[in-house]
Image: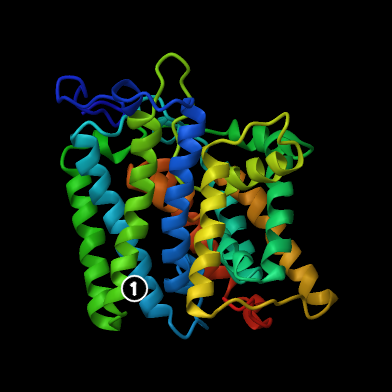
Amino acid sequence: MSQTVRTFDRFEKGIAMLLEQYDWGIDARTLQVLFALGLGLLLGGAAQITRFCLRRAIVPEAADRGPAGAIWLTALAVAIISFQVAASAGFIDLQGHRYLDSSIPVVAIVLGGLAFGAGMVLTRGCASRLTVLAATGNLRAAAVLVVFAVIAHATLKGVLAPVRTTLGALTVDLPFGSLYAIPFAPSVAGALVLLAALYLVRKYQPSVAHVALAIVIGLVPVLGWATTSVLLMDEFEPLDVQSVAFTLPWTETLFWTIASSAIPAGFGTGFIGGVLLGSFFSAIVRGELKLEGFEGGPQMLRYFSGAALMGFGGVLAGGCTVGAGLSGSSALSIAALLALGSITVGAAVFSRIGSNQAAPLAA
C-alpha cells in the first residue's frame, strides 16, 4: 500500500457519492452540517451516559479508572477496525489529508500533547467531556470551553500563531505518514487494541449498555470520515475532509456564533451543536441536569489555566483526545498516534505532581 490510506475505486465498486445519487435541494455544506449534527447527537448522548473521557482512564484518583479505560479502549478498537472495513469498501478516501503527511512536526505534537494532557487534568476533563458537562448545566465547563476556544483560535490565527509556526517547522521526515503503509500493520494494530479492550472489559466489567455505547462512539469518527471524504463530497466545490473533533470545531463554533452572517457553519459547528443537544436531552431523560458554578477565584484560575493549556496544546498537537485520539488514530496516522501518546503521558505525569488535589469538576 502507498504512503497514504488509499481505497479501491469507488466507481468500480459501485459506490457513488450521495450528492450524485439524489437531488437534496440543498448545498453540500448544509448537508454536511446536518449529518454532523446527527453524529454529534449520537456521540453526545452516548458520552453523557458513559461519562466518556480519556482523563478518567488515566488519573489515579478516578474511582472508576478501570471501567473508564475499558470503555475508551473499546471505542478506539472499534474506530480502528471499522475504519479498515470502510476504507477497504471504498467509503473513505483520505489521500492528501494532513494526518497522512509523512513530514511530522514532532516537537509541536509532543509539546502540544503534553500541554493538552496537563490542561485536562487541571480542568478535570478533556474537551469532549467538558462539552457534555456544559450541556448538562455545568457553568464551569462552559466558561472553560470559551477560554479553550479563544486560545485555540489565537494559536491558529492570532497572537500565538508565530509560536505554532516556529514549532511546526521543526519536522522529521518519515517514509510514510500512516501505519497503513506497512503490510499487515492495520490488522495487527486493530487486533492488539481489541484484545486490550476485551481484557479490560473482562477485568473491570463495565455494564453491557456502556460497552454498547462505546461501540457507537467508536463508529462516529469513521462515519465522519466517510461523510466528508466520499458520501457528501462535492467534486465541483470540494469541502475539507474531516471527522469529529473538538479543538478546531469549538473555535469555528465560537466565531460562527459571534459573526454567523459572515462565517458559514461547517461540519465542525454542526457536530458541536449535536453533541450539546445530545448531551442535554440525555441528561433530561436521566434526570441529571444540574446548574453548577465556580467555588472561588483560585478554582477559576486553575480551570482557566487548564483551558489555555488545552487550547494551545490541542492546536500544536493537531487534535484533542477525540480529534487525534479517535478520528486520527482510526486512520493509524503516526502524527495522531504520537499526539494521543503525548496527551496520555502529559495527563499521567501532571496528575502525579499534586495538581489533582483540587475539587472535581463533577467529572
Q: Residue 158 location in percent, x, y?
A: 76, 36
Residue 92 as seen in the image, left or right of residue 146: left
Which image quarter holds the C terminus?
A: bottom right
Count up the numbered dots.
1
Relative depth, front residue between 5 and 23: 23
What colour-coding does the image apply?
A: rainbow
> Residue drawn 26% across and 34% down?
91
> What is the x, y in percent for residue 282?
48, 69
Residue in the foreground of this view, choosing between 169 and 137: 137
Outermost residue to the top: 236
Q: Position of residue 89 (x, y in %)?
A: 18, 35
Does 165 appear above or below 43?
Answer: above
- Residue positioned 40% across, 52% down in the render: 326
Could you classify mark 1 by the number of other residues whose Cα lies within 10 Å: few (under 14), some (14-19), or many (20 or more)?
many
Above or below 302: residue 114: above
Residue highlighted by disc 1: 210
Q: Is residue 18 visible in the rendered structure shown here? A: yes
Q: Is residue 39 above or below residue 174?
A: below
In this rendering, would 185 be left or right of 121?
A: left
- Which quadrant, please, contains the N terminus? top left
Residue nearer the viewer, 305 or 135: 135
Residue kind at label 1, given as amino acid type: His
Q: Secondary structure at mark 1?
A: helix
Question: Residue farthest to the bottom?
Answer: 63
Give above or below for 59 relative to 229.
below
Left or right, 70 with respect to 134, comes to left
State the image coordinates of residue 207 (x, y, percent, origin top left).
30, 80
Residue drawn 75% across and 75% down? 293
Tell me where residue 120 sits by quadrant. bottom right
Q: Can residue 175 be seen in this snapshot? A: no
Q: Quadrant of residue 142?
A: bottom right
